[in-house]
Amino acid sequence: MDLPGLDDLKASGLLDRRPAIEAIPGSDDLFAGQEGSERVEQDADEPGEIEREALEKVQADRDYEQERAEEELEEI
């Protein structure tokens, strides 16, 4: 099997230095029909449900470890 040459790679866009979305032919209409506010998600200042659950779990783990450490100190 022959490997592709430089011309083949350039023709396929694999050696294109532009961002990938710009290298796609006809990419102008990929986001057609979307309004400006929906195009890019904005990061919320408040954590979402998944982040809150993760933070709660981390805090619960810390509390558990702290309790275990205090119990071990009492046994000494």
Image (cartoon, helix red, strand yellow):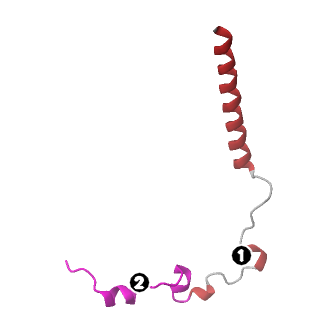
Residue 14's image quarter? bottom left
Residue 12, percent across and down?
Answer: 39, 86
Q: Nearer the viewer, mark 1 or mark 2?
A: 2
- Write the residue at 68% across / 11% down: 74
Q: Is residue 7 magenta?
A: yes
Kind of residue sitting beneath label 1: Arg
Residue 19's image quarter? bottom right
Q: Quadrant of the N terminus?
A: bottom left
SS state under label 2: loop
- Residue nearest the observer in this picture, 30 or 16: 16
Tell me which segment is drawn in magenta. 1-26
Q: Spot the residue most to the right.
A: 46
Q: Which mark is residue 39?
A: 1
- Write the residue at 64% across / 9% down: 75
Residue 35, percent across and down?
Answer: 76, 79
Left/right placement of residue 9 relative to residue 29 reads: left
Q: Is residue 66 magenta?
A: no
Kind of residue sitting beneath label 2: Leu
Count of numbered circles on the image? 2
Q: Which residue is mark 2?
A: 15
Q: Which mark is residue 30?
A: none
Look at the picture and state if 60 lies above or below 32: above
- Residue nearest the observer in this picture, 57 or 31: 57
Left/right placement of residue 40 relative to residue 30 reads: right
